[in-house]
Amino acid sequence: MAINVKLRAFLDLIAWSEGTSTHPLTKNNGYDVIVTGEKNAGETGLEVFDIYTDHPFAFGRAAKIVCIKPKLIKSTASGRYQLELKWWEAYKSMLRLSDFSPASQDAVAVRQISEQGAIEKIENKEIAIAIADCANIWASFPGNNYQQNGGKDLDQLIEQYQLALNALTP
């Protein structure tokens, strides 16, 4: 599926909302960000990666311990859209992807958005509905079921979408 400006702005919104595109260590617009969490034994604390041959956790790296009050969870969320390893493996096979490159990460995110029926809503600029439809995927969206403080403010997300769209529109 081609990524037009409305869909690209929505992808940019997800990256902004997840905090990857604005991560202080990113060198690749969030495509290189690993979930922020506690350092596992032996780790140096790096929260980015620079090899895109596969998901950063595909080679046996231990999941990150993330504090989501009141509990700790293990996470392998990585890349611009914070894709967990288990979902990456399923989509990698389904979409016949050969690597974890930015193009592959985009392809998975577009597929996830499409599976939620949100593509048409994005096309019709029904962004609040598209966000609600995708809340079960991205923890930073309001209405998520990840118990992460309910996600970001909807008005702020809509404003950010419009900023992203304006930046992409000549």
Image (spheres, rainbow, N blue to C red):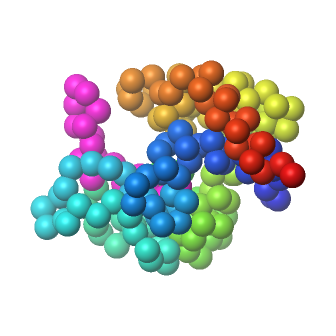
Direction from residue 63 to residue 109 in the image, left or right = right
Direction from residue 100 to residue 66 in the image, left or right = left
Q: Position of residue 114 (x, y in %)?
A: 73, 44
Q: Give the extent of the magenta segment.
A: 64-80
Residue 69 counted in the magenta span: yes
Name the residue rendered at 78%, 42% in the picture. 166
Q: Is residue 107 above or below residue 7?
A: below
Name the residue rendered at 51%, 57% in the picture. 30
Kindly tell me whether residue 23 is visible in this rendering: yes
Name the residue rendered at 76%, 43% in the picture. 165
Direction from residue 167 to residue 60 in the image, left or right = left
Kindly tell me whether residue 120 is visible in this rendering: no
Q: Position of residue 159 (x, y in %)?
A: 67, 29
Residue farthest left in this picture: 41
Judging depth in this view, the residue of 43 and 162 nearest the camera is: 162
Residue 74 counted in the magenta span: yes
Query: How many numbered circles does the render carry?
Result: 0
Name the residue rendered at 82%, 59% in the picture. 2
Q: Position of residue 149 (x, y in %)?
A: 39, 24
Residue 46: image quadrant is bottom left
Q: Position of residue 163 (x, y in %)?
A: 70, 39
Residue 1: image quadrant is bottom right
Q: Is residue 35 above or below residue 100?
A: above
Judging depth in this view, the residue of 148 and 13 nearest the camera is: 13
